[in-house]
Amino acid sequence: MIKFGPSGNSKSFYQMGYKHTTQAPEYLKNLGLDCFEYSFGRGVNMSEEKAIEIGESFKKGGAEISVHAPYFINFANPDEEKAHNSFNYVLKSAKFVKLLGGKRVVFHPAAQGKATREQAVALTVERLKTLRDLIYESGYEDLYICPETMGKFAQIGTLEEVVEFCKIDKIYLPAIDFGHINARELGSLKTVNDYKVRLEYMIGELGYERVKNFHVHFSKIMYAGKGEVKHLTFEDTIYGPEFEPLAIALKELKLEPYIISESDGTQAEDAKAMKEIYQSVNL
C-alpha cells in the first residue's frame, strides 16, 4: 500500500511541544501519515539503545521507518580508503535500520570528481558489487539498499544510472527523487506523461514487481545552471515540480511507492498534502 511521510521532524513538531523522535509516531498519526525517514546525513551518531527505543515507538504507532545514510558517501572516490569508509557508512546504516525496525536505506551514490562520467559510473558499479557482497555477508539481504537520483550535474545519479545500479542485485531498490530529477533537468517534470515516461522506463528495465513499491523523495527544489540549489516548500510557485501529475501517473500505472517529503521545514504538512492530492485523484 502506498505510504506518505516526512524526512525528519517538521518545524511544527517542535512548535507543538514534541521534543524527541520517539514521539513522532503520535504526531504522524494525528496528520494521517504512514511513514518517516530518519536521516543519518551527518553520520550514524545514535546509540543502539536509542535506536531500539525509537523502533518500538514506531512499531506501536503503526508507522514505517526508513533511514538515509550519511551524505558523504562516494563510491566513485579514487581513494580506496575513502571508498572503504563509504562501505562502512552503508553497513552501519543497515545495522541501525534493522534496530529501528525498518527495511530501507537510502544513499547518495557518488560524485564525478575529476574522472570522466563513464569512469565514475563504472567505478561506482564495481563498488556497488562489492557492497552487495558485504551486505550479504553481514546478513542484511532482507533490506532494500536504495541508490538515489541526484540533483546536481556533478553528482552520479541520473535516472538511467540509478536503474543500472539496481540491475546489480535485487537488494537495490531505486530511490527516485523527483525534485532532484526536475532540478537536474532544469524543470523537465510538468505533465502526467513526463512522469509516466520515466516510470514506464523503470518498469521496462527492472520489471513491475521490483518497481511497484519503489522509494520516492519529493519536494520542490530551486535550480540554476548546474542543477539543484536548495529545497523549498509547497508554497513555491516558480520551480516545481507539482505532485498531482505524479499522483495520476502512479494510479494509472498501479504503483504504490513509499513517498517521503523533503520540503524545507514543512515536510510533514507537505506529505499530508500529497496524500490528500493522491486520494482526490479519480481515474
Image (tube, rainbow, N blue to C red):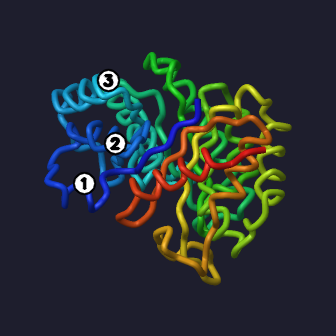
According to the picture, the residue beneath numbered tag 3 turns out to be 59
* Left or right of residue 141: residue 37: left
Determine the residue positioned at 51% across, 18% down. Answer: 142
Number of the label disc, if any, that sits on residue 28: 2
Q: CA distance from mark 2 to mark 1?
A: 9 Å
Q: Amino acid at mark 3?
A: Lys
Q: Nearer the viewer, residue 267 or 43?
A: 267
Query: Which comes before the other along the chain, label 3 or label 1?
Result: 1
Of pointers 2 and 1, the one earlier in the residue sequence: 1
In this view, 161 is above or below 253: below
Do residues under tags 2 and 1 come within 8 Å of each other at their CB atoms?
no
- Disc 2 secondary structure class: helix
State which tag comes first along the sequence, 2 or 3. 2
Label 3 environment density (alpha carbons within 10 Å; few <14, some 14–19, many ≥20): some
Image coordinates for residue 72, horizontal then vertical, percent: 41, 55
List the residue tagged with mark 1.
13
Residue at image point 83% right, 57% down = 193
Circle 1: residue type:
Phe
- In whole angstroms, how far apart are the C-alphas of marks 3 and 1? 19 Å
